[in-house]
Image (tube, helix red, strand yellow):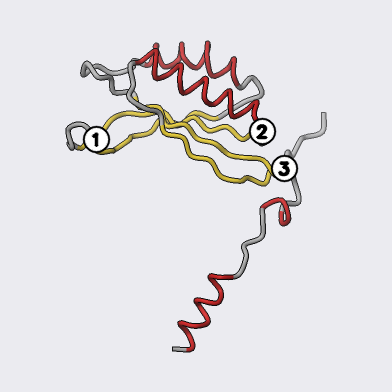
């Protein structure tokens, strides 16, 4: 019983904000999950994906980002059927604020429109950022 009470008490303690424990800069890490399956049964080709990177992602986040090839699995809300598809995970670490929020929304909207997607998933979490730079 005492162990359960101690665990419950720990859960009630406030969690320090990242800004309080971060020796670097308190930023945000955001990921957009870009499915490559299309409604017509086709797939966003490698060339189409690269064109999207070149003309949309680079324009919205010219300071840099990371793109991973991924596999997505989700349940289609309309049919209830499971869907497995190639995906891209677009990861960007950015200062908090409306500029990045707006840019992420523009990327998601552009992807949805260009490739006839039903949605783009976004996840975000606090990130402590430190740049280690070499001697130049």
**Please, is residue 106 above or below residue 81 in the view?**
above
Residue 75: percent from the left, percent from the top? Answer: 24, 38
**65 and 100: which one is in front?**
100
- Mark 2 Cα shell of 10 Å, populated few (<14), some (14-19), many (≥20): few
What residue lies at 70% left-to-right and 44% top-to-bottom? 26
In the drawing, does residue 135 fall left or right of residue 27?
Answer: right
As measured in the structure, the alpha-carbon distance from the residue carrying label 1 to the one carrying label 2 is 32 Å
Looking at the image, do the residues carrying marks 3 and 2 touch, with CB atoms under 8 Å apart? no
Residue 63: percent from the left, percent from the top? Answer: 66, 23
Mark 1 vs mark 2: which is more N-terminal? 1
Q: Secondary structure at mark 1?
A: loop
What residue lies at 50% left-to-right and 21% top-to-bottom? 107
**Please, is residue 20 above or below residue 84 in the view?**
below
In the drawing, does residue 134 fall left or right of residue 42?
Answer: right
Q: What residue sits right under mark 1 in the picture? A: 77
Q: Secondary structure at mark 2?
A: loop
Residue 103: quarter of image: top right
């Amino acid at each position: 019983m005492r162990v359960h009470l101690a665990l419950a008490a720990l859960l009630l303690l406030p969690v320090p904000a990242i800004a309080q424990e971060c020796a670097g800069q308190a930023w945000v890490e955001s990921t957009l999950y870009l499915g490559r399956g299309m409604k017509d049964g086709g797939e966003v080709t490698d060339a189409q994906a690269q064109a999207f990177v070149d003309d949309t992602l680079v324009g919205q986040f010219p300071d840099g980002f990371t793109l991973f090839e991924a596999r997505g699995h989700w349940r289609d809300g309309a049919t209830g059927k499971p869907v497995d598809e190639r995906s891209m995970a677009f990861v960007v670490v950015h200062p908090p604020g409306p500029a990045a929020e707006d840019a992420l929304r523009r990327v998601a909207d552009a992807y949805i429109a260009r490739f006839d997607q039903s949605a783009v998933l976004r996840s975000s979490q606090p990130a402590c950022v430190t740049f280690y730079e070499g001697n130049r």
